[in-house]
Image (tube, rainbow, N blue to C red):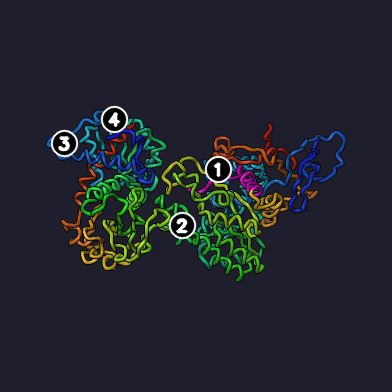
Amino acid sequence: MGTHLWNRKHLLGMADLSREEIHAILDAAASLREVNRRDIKKVPTLRGKTVINLFYENSTRTRTSFELAGKRMSADVINMSVASSSVKKGETLYDTLATLQAMNPDLVVIRHPESGAQEFLARHLDASLVNAGDGRHEHPTQALLDLLTIHDNLPLLEQADFSGLIVAVCGDSLHSRVARSVALGLRTLGAEVRFVGPPGLLPPRAEEAFGVRVFHHLEQGLEGAHVVMALRLQLERMSVGFIPSVREYFAFWGLTKARLAVAAPNAIVMHPGPINRGVEIASEVADDGERSVILDQVANGLAVRMAVMYRLCGVGGGR
Amino acid sequence: MSGFLWIRGARVVDPANGLDATADLLVGDGVIRQVGRCDAPLGCPVLDADGLVLAPGLVDMHVHLREPGFEYKETIAGGTRAAAAGGVTTVAAMPNTRPVNDDPSVTGYILQKARSEGWVNVVPIGAVTRGLAGQELTEMGLQIRAGCVAFSDDGRPVADSGMMRRALEYASAFGTLIIQHAEDPALAGHGCMHEGVISSRLGLPGMPSEAESIMVDRDLRLVALTRGRYHVAHISTGQAVEAVGRARAMGLPVSCEVAPHHFALTDEAVLGYDTDAKMSPPLRGPEERNALLEGLARGIITVIATDHAPHDPDSKRVEFCQASNGVVGLETLLPVSLELVRDGVLGLSACLAAMTVAPARLLGLNRGTLTPGMPADLVLFDLDAPWVVDAARLHGTSRNTCFHGRRVRGRVRKTFVAGRIVHDDDA
């Protein structure tokens, strides 16, 4: 694990990361996976370090993943869940940060419903920060675990590296921090990225903003794709007029086995979870052991988060 | 010779009178007595203004003084102090105070406060509708009698087409101006910045330019229907500028103003989620900015106004979408506008006209010129002096500037209101 490739204090987004930095984390994650297969799943890398998981949004999988990652590296991990409604009632983010600062943590993992919350934190806190999702902006550890999962599957896809790869990101990319982070990371690594979905659910001027290709018809977007990533559709999108109904959405943008026929021969299917079966993805696809790598994503998430913590504040992690 | 001042050797620029020449100006008892070669009385104090520009004091027709009700953001005293520092001698105070200025008693309060505590002239703008609620017209006639010079629900649009029609019709009885914060509320939605490449990258909900232009298009049709006088506040889009240009060409009583931040900056300033770059309308993309510069050059945009909007730190030190809209601008109005002159968009006289005689005429004020007999509201500035905007050195109560750190040229040396020095940079 070379140390010269990484000298960042924070991981705020994929937009900041170079190809070398991405690989530095993926390499570290690939090595750390071995820890998770051991009988005693613990290394002393972060002993004496304090990690605070500050979650302003409900999240089971991401919070658990960060918590476990910290604990397997011997850090003291504290979870702080702050319901977003209580923010409106009382304490401002600024005041919460002042309180946190007084506890002098080494690493703060933050998830927040507002885009840009991590930048706000970085301005007011001395600790290293990991963005675990801010609004619809970025979710870099999700992107990194997706990249690791894709990387693992490159031989299956008969690709030497990311440069010849076509990745179709399907669904509501407008509201998706995962779509943004994944697209930015993949573009940095040289892959072709497609945003596929109904026009109102794609970020305005996505081609310019992210260097992606935009498709409104699922079949066209899937054609020749090596990786198909389905995004979760928030069910409240219906009530505010983005799309008319779940039935209609699934009929035109739901990922089914039949539609996948136009993708590349061994194409893999990914999903950041949690899955809405019968909304953005059919069960026959989600549960297809040949194609679906959704559970690999979860396992890789743990390794990637360990790698990120190691790079940011582990002994010999680079800084 | 008390009461007299002989300002000697300045480059005197008086757009209203087509004057741009080295000249003297004689002030006596608060009034401009002579411009050109002056017969100063014996013993008259002399101010040597060699190398400086002397112009009418600036008139800013779009300012939020926040008093009454939001004195923790700004006061009439603090806001007019900032104005004096910026060379602004008359400010039009927007009515979104608490209580809203929708009643002659509030207008009276503001004027009384301005007389006792203000550094420069304050002219109140009354609300179009009671409580800015968009439902009932205010007593415009009584408000004018109390001192209001125009009407606006600024901060929010008069959204209802029927209400806007009534407002334009009724205001025309008094020949007064309706100033519109042009924004289609449903189209703007929950947007907190301009919709474009940057909003997509930042993952912030955007407001499309059409939210402004659709409202301007609608209003212009209502102006054609009613012949009421109509002014677009802080215009920010090319489409709206084009529409105003067409309406003016048709002879409709229509005008618009632009704020310095809109012609000087783009939505790139929001990168990093800087809440001091958050305002309504938002900073737009480069193509919109270019359209604003073109609108200025073509004389469609005739007024530069700041939309000076002070906010306390707690209103800005929050997540981007939660932050209050608005930036202060009085103290950066002149230097940022002078960039238009250096960039060849406007001549110096045209640039100053947009901040003096043009807004004064729209508001029916007998100000903004150096015609002898007028109150001696003057600004004396160094056209080329370079300085760096420093939020900490601003004079108002709040410091939420989007120009912090900007290298500018053009420095106010002295500001006079009715012949009295209200700001002295050399002091």
Percent x, y for residue A313? 30, 33
Q: Which amino acid, mark 4?
A: Gly
Residue placed under numbered mark 3 in the picture: A41
Residue placed under numbered mark 4 in the picture: A316
- Earlier residue among tags 1 and 2: 2
Extreme residue toward the top, this view: A48
Extreme residue toward the left, this view: A39
Q: Nearer the viewer, mark 1 or mark 4?
A: 4
Left or right: where B408 falls relative to A65:
right
Q: Which amino acid, mark 2?
A: Met
Q: Residues within 10 Å of mark 3 (few under 14, many from 20)?
A: few
Disc 3 versus disc 2: distance between alpha carbons? 49 Å
Q: Residues within 10 Å of mark 4 (few under 14, many from 20)?
A: few
Look at the image and say whether residue A31 sits in the magenta stretch: no
| Residue B280 in sight | no
Between A288 and B14, the residue placed more toward the observer is A288
Rendered-image quadrant of the C terminus of chain B: top right
SS at circle 2? strand
Q: Which amino acid, mark 1?
A: Phe
Q: Which amino acid, mark 3?
A: Lys
Between A176 and A259, the residue placed more toward the observer is A259
Percent x, y for residue A311? 30, 35
SS at circle 3? loop
Disc 2 versus disc 4: distance between alpha carbons? 46 Å
Residue placed under numbered mark 2 in the picture: B207
Q: Which residues are drawn in magenta?
A: B324-342
Residue placed under numbered mark 1 in the picture: B403
Disc 1 versus disc 4: distance between alpha carbons? 41 Å
Q: Residues within 10 Å of mark 2 (few under 14, many from 20)?
A: many
